[in-house]
Image (cartoon, rainbow, N blue to C red):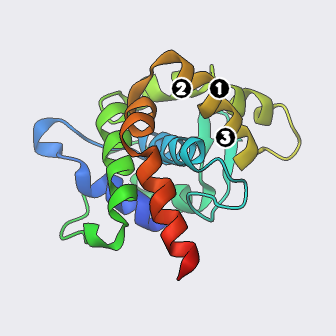
Amino acid sequence: MTTYNTSQIADFMLAKSSPELGDIISNLKLQKLLYYAAGVMAAIRQDVNQPRFTDRIEAWTHGPVVPAQYHRFSQFGSGPIPPVEGFNFDQFRPIDLQVLDDVYGFYGQYSAWKLRNMTHEEAPWLASFEQADKTISLRQLIDFFVEERWSREFGPVVKVDRLMRKTIQDEEAKESFC
């Protein structure tokens, strides 16, 4: 299984945005998209040793944040982050690209504030925000996105489950023999 760095995932999300159509991404929205990408992939992989990406996710006041990416884009304040031009989508495995497309297609439709409010009702943020160490663990993501999201027929998780789970497992089995 491939683990990506958060810059790759953030740049993917920014490359998908279309400001000319009103599809803008602020730092707040980007942080929530990174959280949902990590959560959906955690639900698919269900392996605490195989995170979606290496940087930690923390429970901040306005929801989940990947600190490294938050600081990377902090110069934009609450304004829009420009799209990434000429992004190389081929750096992702096809199966991971489909997951990211599904995450962006579903969660990207919501405003930054709507995503913030959604995360404030979810177990990973709720539990971690009350801790001294505000890190949202991979185990929390797996437990929440498997138990809560899958059972509600919610968003890309079900689509990924139905269409790709076997493909992902087959592909990973092939990789383990290489």
Task: Tell whether label 1 touches label 2 (CB within 8 Å).
Answer: yes
Q: Residues within 10 Å of mark 3 (few under 14, many from 20)?
A: many
Which badge, 1 or 3, is on the more N-terminal residue? 3
For disc 1, the marked residue is 147
Q: Amino acid at mark 1?
A: Glu
Residue most extreme to the left: 20
Q: Amino acid at mark 2?
A: Trp
Mark 1 element type: helix
Residue 83 falls left or right of residue 129:
left
Distance between the alpha carbons at the discs numbered 1 and 3: 8 Å
Residue 4 falls left or right of residue 104:
right
Residue at position x 17%, y 35% in the image: 22
Q: Which image quadrant is residue 93 in? A: bottom left
Q: Which quarter of the image is occupied by the N terminus?
A: bottom right
Q: Residues within 10 Å of mark 1 (few under 14, many from 20)?
A: few
Distance between the alpha carbons at the discs numbered 2 and 3: 11 Å
For disc 3, the marked residue is 142
Residue most extreme to the bottom: 178
For disc 2, the marked residue is 150
Q: Is residue 118 above or below residue 142?
A: above
Q: Is residue 154 visible?
A: yes
Image x and y of residue 34, in percent: 49, 48
Residue at position x 46%, y 45% in the image: 165
Image x and y of residue 116, in percent: 52, 28
141 or 153: nearer the viewer: 153
- On residue 86, the disc is none
Task: Tell whether label 3 touches label 2 (CB within 8 Å).
Answer: no
Q: Amino acid at mark 3?
A: Ile
Q: Is residue 41 above or below residue 176?
A: above
Distance between the alpha carbons at the discs numbered 2 and 1: 6 Å
Residue 70 falls left or right of residue 94:
right
31 or 172: nearer the viewer: 172
